[in-house]
Structures are given as structure tokens and as C-alpha cells.
Image (spheres, helix red, strand yellow):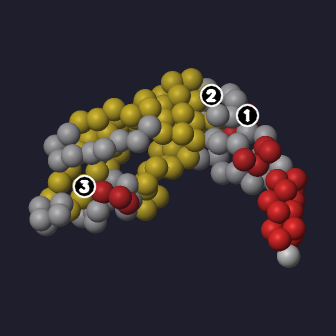
Amino acid sequence: MKAYWLLLPAMLLIAVPARALETYCQSSGTRVHDGGHYEARWLVVHPKARRVQSKTTPSCSIAYSSVGAMYRPIEIITAPKNGRARVTTTYRITYEPSKMGPDALTIRIYWIGQRGDYRTATVRYNIEVIDRPL
């Protein structure tokens, strides 16, 4: 029985292709506080540079569910010029690149603090669309 548990991880490594483990989106984490203005870096692999075309979505998303309950959806202040951004849920922003190179997106988030007070912060994402997996 012990031999079975030793063989299982090896079989999983053989069965899962290495390219399925590639990363196509990466963002520097941002801690937000009430009234703050923050900058973050967001690396996105262009959909044409992705090796697994059929199993990936052409967009990347960031969720703000950890800040707490939101009293308004995320607001896009400055839309990107080389892609498309949209608010997909109250807590999630999605970016879909259309061409390579730098891009920018500015959003405002609204959440309720621990004492029930309304809070807001602005985050500017400096987006870099690249042509290779991360």
C-alpha cells in the first residue's frame, strides 16, 4: 500500500504537461487603505503568445474580495488604451489585451470598514503585455 502512495505523485507529474502549468497573469499585491492612491504592476501574456490556446481565457482578472464587503462595484476611472477592462463582479476587474506593450488602468474601489464606515481607494495598474509566458 505504501508503494502506491509513492507512485501516485510520480504518475501525476508525468500525466500533467509542463505547459499547462504556465502562468499568464501576474500582479504585485496591493494593500489599500482609506483615501489612498496606489500603484501596482500587472504582467499579462498576450493571448497569441500562450501555448495552450483552447484552455485559457484571453483575459486576466484581479479580485478585491479580501478588503471586505463592498458598497459599490469597482469603478474604472481611466480605461486602458491597448486593451479592454471591465468589472465582471462587484469584487473583480478583468483586463483583456489587444496588443503588446505598456498600458495603464486606474480603478476606484469602495468598501465598508470594520466599524461600518465607508472607505475608498484608488489603484493605478501599470500593465505590461508581453509575448512569452511568465
Say whether residue 34 is left or right of residue 78. Answer: left
Q: Residue 11: image x %, image y %?
A: 87, 59
Image quarter hosting the C terminus = top right
Residue found at the very far front of the displayed protein:
2
Residue picked out by circle 1: 49
Q: Calculate the distance from the C-alpha at mark 1 to the C-alpha at mark 2.
A: 8 Å
Amino acid of disc 2: Ile
Residue found at the very far top of the displayed protein:
101
Amino acid of disc 1: Ala
Asked if residue 74 can be seen in this view, the reply is yes
Query: Could you say which quadrant of the image residue 107 lies in?
Result: top left
Q: Which mark is residue 110?
A: 3
Residue drawn at x 48%, y 35% as measured from the top left: 42
Residue found at the very far bottom of the displayed protein:
1
Dot 1 and dot 2 residues touching (CB under 8 Å): yes
Q: Residue 115: image x %, image y %?
A: 12, 65
Rendered position, 106 above or below 128: below
Q: Which mark is residue 123?
A: none
Rendered position, 46 above or below 111: above
Rendered position, 75 above or below 3: above
SS under mark 2: strand
SS under mark 1: helix
Amino acid of disc 3: Tyr
Dot 3 and dot 2 residues touching (CB under 8 Å): no
Other residues around mark 1 within 10 Å, as few (<14) / some (14–19) / many (≥20): few
Residue picked out by circle 2: 130
Q: Residue 32: image x %, image y %?
A: 27, 45
The answer to which of marks 1 and 3 sits earlier in the sequence is 1
Say whether residue 9 is left or right of residue 25. Answer: right
